[in-house]
Image: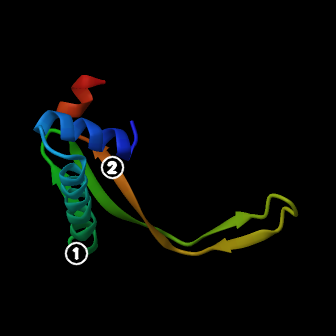
Amino acid sequence: MNKSDLITQIAQEMHTSKLAATRLLDTVLGNIRRGLQEEGTVTITGFGTFEVKVRKPRIGRNPHTGEPIEIKAGKRVGFRVGKGLKQLC
């Protein structure tokens, strides 16, 4: 399922327009982004937890030459599945 499919599903279940469903989904996703930026974690009970994780700098290898290269530190978003979602899968 992609974003467009999700919007269609939301619109059908809420008996509303696709425009309203798009605004709803964009608002939810925007708030998740904001929560990650400001607090570092967003927990949705029964679904899961989004969390910003810091990657340490490390040494990697250029796959073409085999020469070592420095990979800079960075951030990524991780997701831990909640109990309610785990039981569905």
For marks 1 and 2, give the CA distance. Answer: 17 Å
Q: Give the quadrant of the C terminus.
A: top left
Which element type, helix, strand or loop, lies under badge 1?
Answer: helix
Which element type, helix, strand or loop, lies under badge 2?
Answer: strand
- Residue at x 14% of width, y 43% of height: 16
Residue 47 image position (x, y, % from top left): 20, 41
Q: Residues within 10 Å of mark 2 (few under 14, many from 20)?
A: some
Comparing 53 with 44, the one in front is 44
| The label number, if any, that marks residue 79 in the structure image | 2
| Image quarter of residue 75 | bottom left
Give the residue number, with chain letter if any, for mark 1.
38
Comparing 64 with 14, the one in front is 14
Is 47 left, or right, of 8 in this rendering?
A: left
- Residue at x 69% of width, y 64% of height: 60
- Using the image, determine if residue 45 lies above or below residue 34: above
Comparing 36 with 69, the one in front is 36
Residue 20 image position (x, y, % from top left): 18, 53
Residue 70 image position (x, y, % from top left): 67, 74
Tag 1: residue type? Glu
- Residue at x 78% of width, y 64% of height: 62
Is 83 left, or right, of 68 in this rendering?
A: left
